[in-house]
Image (cartoon, coloured by chain):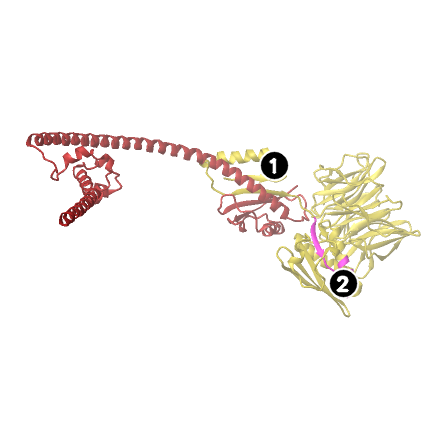
Chain colours: A yellow, B red
């Protein structure tokens, strides 16, 4: 007999029907196997105990790890006040049995010339260590070191790569001078890049994460440059007349898209860096701007007003097979691909304000994610679980982050800094 | 004269002594029970053997005609004392003439004939009763057999239904425990997964993994399901006092 029991999903009368059917259908009503039980449960935040690492800087490192795991939305770091086991004490699953913790992180910091951190992750159910690693970094890189620990915990427990070492670039405006900032994924450790201009727009990461493309207005022209993060040297790439706004790199890394009004109305172009070759993809009447290359490099999403109002379109990498994606709203701009290429986030005008939306690439599943203030320029995290965007909900423009579902929206750029055009690094 | 008086006194004494001796002798004679012993013995000799059919078949000794068996016959069923004397093989203590002796012998023969007839009737009745008993027993056995068969079938039906109900309720309780013990987090939402694991619950409630019947393809998801089982480890014993095999299917709620 096979009886299916489904918790929360199956009403009791259906269970009875299933049972009756199983009895009737089984040969001569005899049992031939055990019960088949369905357990349907939603994923939840995993309770984890991040113990304060022993040694110097131990508390700071533990704090960063705990924040990372909490912000990920997949973990629930437990209150250290509830811990029975002391940091220097040997791990025992008995100490954690009543806390609900699924995993426990313990470790030590040895501060010499560099920081040496040794951590061990224990599985409470198994009652044994499941991960043990050592990290080494200079003291200035304490936070990246802690993020690296978080990544390893995340990978071990979820099986996916963490985004705790990723970065977010955004433009700033202070005293009439535009600049560019680079921050960790959580908005902390912001540092200014040596890029100055009257105005800066559209920073776009190279797929390697080692350089950033951007548009800068210097004098009266908008040109496209690239800054190499290892050398912090700026490289001019597009210096055509008119307005040239960066689009995005193709995956192969030597080609990028941009929009240019060098021939009149803005159109979409591609540029081969090594060959220094331009290729025009659109020739339609009207404005074609904001090109975004899909993760597989086969498609380009862009904005066109060919039908009268700015809408999101897609075309192939050669400029053919154009399809209109959005029909709702009368002003949709700033498309950004999800890492799996199945969803596009964009900003759209709705009820006298700009809001963030997502839509599947088949044109279905339109969702509005924001509602407070003006929210624009979305960019998805490499794992597709988060979106950074610009919002003026608190007055001046600032950088905010939210889950891809629209939950847990919070500001990540420092106060007092006018910030916009955020872009999430690919790694 | 003194001699005569002495003689009288002597005669009186002798008379007294003679009377004493007489009475003592008489008393001794009356206190003996020899005659009654003879009577009992006499009855024993002529008493018919107990009818064989009435004797319990499980007691072979009852067929024995030995003395020990005979002594079991109760005296109340013996012939009356008058007849007892007639039936006695012992020489009668009274005088008997030939005529009356012939009469008595004829009476005895008739009595023996009647006794034999009675014995035969009783034997026949016992035989008939035995046949009736056998037939009755056969009918009862048949009825019992049918009743047992029908009862077993009915009882079997109820047992199956009860078994299913008990098993279903048991499964629900196991499901609730596993549900509570299952903790997993998922970085990739809306993923369609299913992990099927067969477990064995021993009669004392120890749950052990037998086999991952159907992995989901997501190693972390499978591991979380296995951990839920491992975390459960001990549950209430199965309802029928024997080991029970369960298939646990884990699904993410979407």
The reply to whether residue B93 is visible in this rendering is yes
Closest to the observer, A198 or B4: B4
Residue B134 percent coordinates (x, y): 27, 33
- Using the rendered image, report if marks 2 and 1 lie on a common chain: yes
User: Where the C terminus of chain A falls, by quadrant?
Assistant: bottom right
According to the image, label 1 marks what residue?
A10
- Residue placed at 56% from the left, 42% from the top? B171
Q: Is residue A143 left or right of residue B145?
A: right
For label 1, the SS is: loop
Looking at this rendering, what residue extends furthest in the bottom direction?
Answer: A113
User: Quadrant of residue B31 in the image?
Assistant: top left
Q: Callout 2 environment at 10 Å: few (<14), some (14 to 19), or many (20+)?
A: some
According to the image, label 2 marks what residue?
A58
Q: Is residue A351 left or right of residue A106?
A: right
Q: Is residue A185 magenta?
A: no
Of the numbered discs 2 and 1, the one sitting upstream in the chain is: 1
- Residue placed at 51% from the left, 46% from the top? B245
Segment tinted magenta in the rendering: A45-63
Closest to the observer, A254 or A85: A85
Q: Chain of mark 1?
A: A
């Amino acid at each position: 007999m096979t009886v299916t029991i489904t918790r929360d999903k199956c009403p009791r009368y259906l269970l009875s029907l299933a049972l009756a059917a199983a009895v009737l259908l089984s040969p001569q009503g005899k049992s031939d196997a055990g019960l088949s039980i369905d357990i349907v449960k939603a994923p939840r935040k995993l309770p984890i105990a991040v113990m304060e690492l022993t040694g110097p800087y131990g508390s700071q490192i533990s704090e960063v790890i705990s924040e990372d795991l909490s912000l990920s939305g997949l973990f629930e770091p437990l209150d250290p006040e509830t811990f029975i086991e002391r940091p220097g004490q040997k791990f025992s699953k008995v100490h954690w049995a009543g806390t609900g913790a699924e995993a426990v992180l313990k470790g030590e910091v040895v501060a010499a010339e560099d920081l040496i951190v040794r951590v061990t992750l224990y599985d409470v159910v198994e009652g044994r260590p499941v991960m043990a690693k050592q990290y080494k970094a200079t003291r200035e890189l304490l936070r990246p070191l802690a993020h690296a620990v978080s990544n390893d915990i995340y990978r071990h427990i979820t099986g996916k790569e963490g985004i705790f070492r990723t970065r977010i670039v955004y433009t700033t405006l202070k005293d009439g001078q535009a600049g560019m900032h680079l921050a960790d994924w959580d908005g902390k450790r912001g540092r200014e890049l040596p890029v100055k201009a009257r105005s800066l727009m559209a920073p776009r990461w190279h797929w390697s994460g080692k350089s950033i493309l951007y548009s800068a207005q210097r004098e009266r022209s908008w040109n496209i440059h690239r800054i190499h993060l290892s050398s912090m040297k700026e490289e001019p790439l597009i210096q055509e007349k008119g307005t040239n706004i960066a689009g995005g790199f193709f995956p192969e890394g030597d080609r990028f898209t941009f929009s240019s009004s060098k021939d009149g109305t803005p159109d979409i172009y591609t540029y081969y860096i090594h060959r220094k070759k331009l290729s025009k993809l659109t020739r339609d009447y009207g404005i074609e701007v904001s090109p975004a290359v899909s993760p597989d490099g086969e498609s380009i999403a862009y904005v066109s007003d060919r039908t009268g109002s700015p809408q999101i379109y897609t075309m192939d990498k050669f400029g053919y097979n154009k399809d209109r994606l959005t029909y709702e709203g009368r002003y949709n701009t700033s498309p950004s691909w999800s890492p799996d290429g199945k969803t596009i986030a964009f900003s759209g005008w709705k009820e006298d304000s700009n809001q963030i939306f997502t839509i599947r690439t088949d044109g279905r599943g339109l969702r509005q994610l924001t509602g407070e203030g003006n929210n624009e320029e979305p960019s998805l995290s490499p794992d597709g679980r988060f979106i950074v965007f610009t919002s003026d909900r608190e007055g001046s423009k600032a950088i905010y982050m939210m889950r891809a579902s629209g939950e847990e929206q919070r500001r990540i750029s420092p106060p007092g800094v006018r910030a916009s055009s955020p872009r999430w690094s690919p790694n | 004269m003194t001699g005569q008086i002495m003689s009288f006194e002597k005669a009186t004494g002798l008379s007294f002594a003679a009377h004493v001796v007489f009475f003592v002798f008489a008393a001794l004679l009356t206190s003996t029970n020899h005659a009654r012993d003879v009577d009992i013995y006499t009855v024993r000799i002529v008493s018919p053997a107990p009818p064989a059919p009435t004797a319990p078949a499980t007691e072979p000794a009852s067929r024995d005609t030995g003395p020990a068996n005979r002594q079991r016959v109760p005296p109340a069923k013996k012939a009356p004392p008058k007849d007892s004397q007639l039936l006695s093989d012992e020489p009668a203590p009274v005088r008997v003439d030939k005529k009356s002796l012939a009469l008595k012998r004829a009476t005895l023969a008739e009595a023996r004939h009647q006794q034999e007839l009675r014995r035969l009737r009783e034997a026949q009745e016992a035989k008939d009763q035995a046949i009736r008993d056998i037939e009755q027993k056969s009918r009862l056995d048949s009825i019992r057999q049918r009743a047992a068969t029908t009862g077993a079938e009915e009882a079997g039906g109820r047992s199956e239904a009860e078994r299913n109900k008990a098993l279903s309720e048991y499964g629900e309780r196991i499901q609730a425990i596993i549900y509570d013990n299952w903790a997993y987090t998922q970085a990739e939402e809306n993923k369609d997964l299913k992990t099927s694991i067969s477990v064995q619950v021993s009669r004392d409630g120890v749950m052990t993994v037998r086999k991952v019947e159907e992995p989901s393809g997501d190693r972390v998801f499978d591991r979380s399901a296995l951990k839920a089982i491992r975390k459960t480890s001990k549950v209430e014993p199965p309802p029928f006092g024997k080991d029970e095999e369960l298939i646990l299917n884990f699904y993410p709620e979407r």
